């Protein structure tokens, strides 16, 4: 199995170096992934009363590839992934942004680990970190960091061979997968949590020759990896308070729900169609680029959607009430296209976004805060 993995890795690298990098760098409908599209003028408009926006931190390393992920530890320190240049240069890593403001009047930004090709990141209830790697390989690996405040020494908890068996790979029928989504599940009787992975074909939107993505479950000890569901292309995924998984597909305007009971049934959770004061607002059915999800402690789901080269919005799917479907509202509009597609809630329900102006060499993190 190790030999097979090596062949896959080298085959992909050769493919990229010989011109196959178009699999990674050419998104659908002309949306550039390596650089932000043209900037939308004006500031984001928060349509729900009682919210404000502020700069949280700057100086976070600019990613080599436009996709990044956020995660918070128990102290609400922010961790930012950098997948680097898709495995070619072996760069990337994870940076830590302190929640507390230091003596300089700014929040400290520091390198947490130089792990290469970090695609997704999550913390369990005990404060341990997991992250997925292997951006150009069908053998994405998951590592477990047991001492996240002491340099990020990683212990492998699920070998790539497990994922390779779950995702049969042939160059004729399927592109490799990226584990873009990574969440911890509910604890078992021993207090240990499984990990759920949502994968997407490398093309960030797939094509006709592609098979589907996967939702996988890794047991707490890493000894078992099994498939839960086979959606077409998992854009992002979160864990709901009831233990179900909510995910978005790259190809429609629906949020789906999967109950982790082993049966893999996919159900419709909400449709991003809203009634607003200005009339009916319907998300385009051709959202083939980016969707990012986060859920606040109250169970409200926020969906950041890049609907076109010049249109990015955030939709709020309110926590469901008994006997009623989740209510969808248009939450933030007029988002500049320099904003990286990422959104994350901390333990207080604040939301975090990242901006990457073309003339800057680093990211700026913004926080949306609700008045209390």
Image (spheres, rainbow, N blue to C red):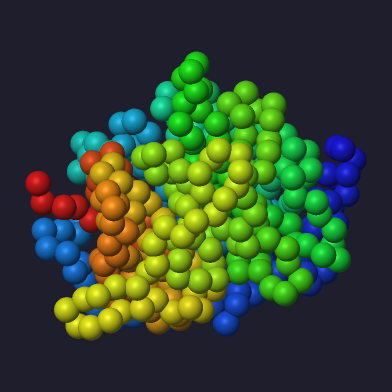
User: The N terminus appears in which quarter of the rendering?
Assistant: top right
Residue 205 or 57: which is nearer the viewer? 205
Up-down: is 34 above or below 126?
A: below
Indicate the position of residue 152 as horizontal and vertical percent values. Answer: 53, 30
Q: Describe residue 118's horizontal placement relative to residue 315 as left or right.
A: right
Up-down: is 84 above or below 356?
A: above
- Tell me which residue sits at (73%, 63%) in the image: 211
Identify the image quadrant of residue 149: top left
Q: Describe residue 183's horizontal placement relative to residue 90 as left or right.
A: left
Number of numbered markers? 0
Residue 198 or 258: which is nearer the viewer? 258
- Tell me which residue sits at (46%, 60%) in the image: 268
Indicate the position of residue 45 as horizontal and vertical percent values. Answer: 21, 71
Indicate the position of residue 325 as horizontal and vertical percent values. Answer: 32, 59
Indicate the position of residue 7 as horizontal and vertical percent values. Answer: 88, 49
- Tell me which residue sits at (68%, 38%) in the image: 226
- Is residue 27 in sight in this rendering? yes
Identify the image quadrant of residue 243: top left
């Amino acid at each position: 199995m190790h030999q097979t993995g090596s062949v896959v890795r080298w085959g992909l690298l050769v493919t990229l170096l010989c011109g196959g990098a178009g699999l990674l760098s050419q998104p659908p409908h002309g949306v550039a992934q390596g650089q932000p599209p043209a900037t939308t003028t004006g500031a984001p408009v928060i349509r729900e009363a009682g919210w404000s926006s502020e700069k949280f931190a700057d100086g976070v390393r600019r990613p080599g590839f436009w996709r990044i992920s956020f995660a918070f530890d128990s102290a609400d320190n922010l961790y930012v992934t950098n997948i680097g240049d898709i495995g070619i240069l072996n760069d990337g890593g994870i940076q830590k942004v302190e929640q507390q403001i230091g003596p300089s009047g700014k929040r400290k930004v520091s390198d947490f680990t130089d792990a290469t090709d970090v695609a997704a990141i999550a913390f369990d209830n005990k404060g341990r970190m997991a992250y997925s790697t292997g951006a150009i390989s069908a053998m994405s690996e998951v590592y477990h960091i047991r001492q996240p405040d002491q340099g990020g020494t990683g212990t492998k908890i699920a070998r790539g061979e497990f994922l390779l068996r779950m995702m049969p790979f042939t160059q004729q029928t399927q592109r490799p997968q990226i584990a873009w989504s990574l969440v911890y599940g509910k604890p078992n009787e021993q207090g240990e949590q499984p990990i759920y992975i949502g994968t997407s074909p490398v093309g960030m939107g797939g094509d006709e020759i592609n098979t589907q993505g996967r939702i996988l479950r890794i047991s707490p000890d890493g000894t078992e990896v099994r498939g839960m569901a086979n959606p077409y292309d998992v854009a992002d995924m979160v864990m709901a308070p009831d233990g179900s998984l909510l995910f978005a597909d790259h190809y429609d305007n629906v949020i789906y729900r999967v109950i982790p009971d082993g049966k893999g049934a996919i159900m419709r959770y909400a449709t991003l169609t809203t009634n607003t004061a200005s009339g009916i607002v319907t998300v385009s059915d051709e959202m083939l680029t980016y969707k990012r999800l986060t859920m606040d402690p109250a169970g409200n789901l926020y969906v950041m959607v890049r609907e076109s080269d010049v249109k990015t919005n955030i939709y709020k799917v309110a926590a469901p009430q008994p006997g009623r479907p989740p209510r969808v509202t248009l939450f933030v509009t007029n988002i500049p296209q320099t904003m990286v597609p990422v959104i994350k809630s901390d333990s207080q329900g604040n939301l975090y976004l990242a901006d990457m102006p073309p003339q800057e060499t680093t990211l700026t993190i913004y926080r949306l805060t609700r008045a209390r």
